[in-house]
Image (cartoon, coloured by chain):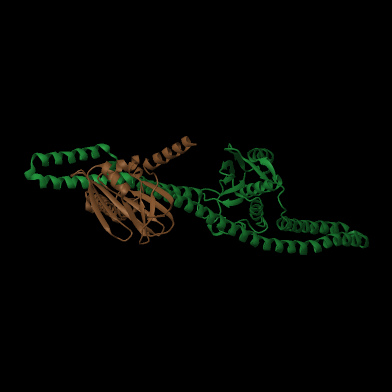
Chain colours: A green, B brown
Amino acid sequence: MKSLMSSRSKLLFLAAIVVSALLVFAWVIRQLSFISLGLAANREVQQVLRTSLDDQKKLARADPSSSATYRKRFDEIRQLLGHLQILELTRENLTRHYELLLLAVMAAILFAGSGLAIVERRVRDRRRTQYLQHLTSWQEAARRHAHEIRTPLTAASLEIGELVSKLSKRYPEAAPELKNAESSIREELDQLRRFTTGFTSFAVIGEPQRKRHDLAQFLAEFCSMFAATWPRMRIILEDPEGDCHVVADREMIRQVFVNLCSNSAFVATELRIRARRSGGNVLVDFRDDGPGIPPEIRARLFEPYTTTRKIGEGMGLGLAISKKIMLDHDGDLVLLQSSRGAAFRMSLPS
Amino acid sequence: MRARIAIAILAGALLAAAPATRPVATITPGGQLDITLPANILRNDEVRKHLTSGLTTVFLLTANDGGARVEIRYELWDEKFLVAVIDGERRVQKTSIDTFEHLAEWWSRTPLRTGKAQSEVRAKLEVIPFSAREEEDAQRWLARSIGESSNTADPAQRNDATARAGSILDLLIGTSVQRHPLQTWRWTLRAEKAP
């Protein structure tokens, strides 16, 4: 399930908003300090203007014939001084307005960020619900198929033994041939039984029994125990980053590991596994050097019965089961974009 | 007993001689309310300092549903206080006073007619540091100053974004340069009939 916007894009988006807001604010402050507050707050300017007022008065007294000129200049200076005094008196108000502007910008950023997170969560939840509903109908179908097959299978298995036994008594000379035929039929029935077991394991995925585990340690144990299972593939476990403790069902998570490793082992010679902490999640990436996932099936890769293998080599349930397990853990399993091989990321809340 | 009466008379005389610190509300024979404000308002440090700034200090008195306004501007050229009183009946009375002490004396003996009389008066006095006209002048001057500073840039380089930001700044200044009281007093007074 692809998230609406990746964490990286979100970070860049928020950073762009913050930088824009700061630029606007810096511009406003520059304008403001340059034009008004700088002048208004400057006591020296006001003092010079006051002195200048006194000078005009003194000049008018000294030269009464030009009194009107000095008076006109006096009024101009007085008006300018008045403007600066008003700015000084309202400076607090001005500052408060700019602070409010900044607060509004910050609130808008937070609101947009929260809104984005809520939308993203809702979209994710809706997709998750849709996927699980879809999967439930597949599970129900699988359960019915398994039941329909298993009943005659069990009967056939019992009947074949009895039939061979009776025929062998009646036709002792044909006993070896009958034994061979029985063996051959049983092999086919076993194949059919394995097939139904696959159906059953998909149809009945239990509730996870969660306990706290160190996923990094669990992965290390898994790799050392299961490495021999896939002799043609080298598993490279990279050093974990951060605290990788999760609350999960160990057996179920092991099943996911096994499914992912088994898929890679069919086509790849090397599989790299890396666990790391990211926010409130622990992420585990599985990257192999195989041919990768064909583009035409990427979109429906996690749907049941989707497989790249030939008929008879697999039912295509492994990834669907793994996805269901991860969703039941409030985590997820997603296919990553990769230039080489297949890459999956499982995430679990820590 | 005589000593007590003498002390009481002395205390009463002292109280009567002391400058009033509360407004006095009186009901005129015509049923109007007059309020006389105490001089300690003008002597308040912040008010007194502002009175000689050259800006018009506006004293806005509201009493129940009525009110009156006193505008005092210190004329820096003539070094006089120019006073205008606009009472509740919209009558304007103007005067000029040469010193602060004379102003304080005029203030404490000038009743302000606020409107119809009521026995209980809720009065509020706000001291506003500049007049509405001075506020408009300052806003215009500031907007012009900003416009001039913006125009100093190469017009070819100015784009719509700059113009929009400029408008936002104008709006901010327009809403920021507003009159707010320096001081506010509130009283509840009992109006007495004028003798």
Is residue A267 positioned above or below A178 on the image?
A: above
Q: Nearer the viewer, residue A255 or A191?
A: A255
Q: Is residue A59 left or right of residue A128?
A: left
Can residue A30 be spotted in the picture?
no
Q: Is residue A226 left or right of residue A89?
A: right
In percent of width and height, residue A202 lies at 70, 56
In percent of width and height, residue A263 lies at 63, 50
Can residue B12 be spotted in the picture?
yes
Q: Nearer the viewer, residue B139 or A295?
A: B139
Q: Nearer the viewer, residue B29 or A81?
A: B29
Q: Is residue A338 left or right of residue B105?
A: right
Q: Residue at x 67, y 44 (%)?
A: A247
Quadrant for the C terminus of chain B in the image: bottom left
In percent of width and height, residue B67 lies at 36, 57
Q: Nearer the viewer, residue A23 or B183?
A: B183
In percent of width and height, residue B23 lies at 38, 49
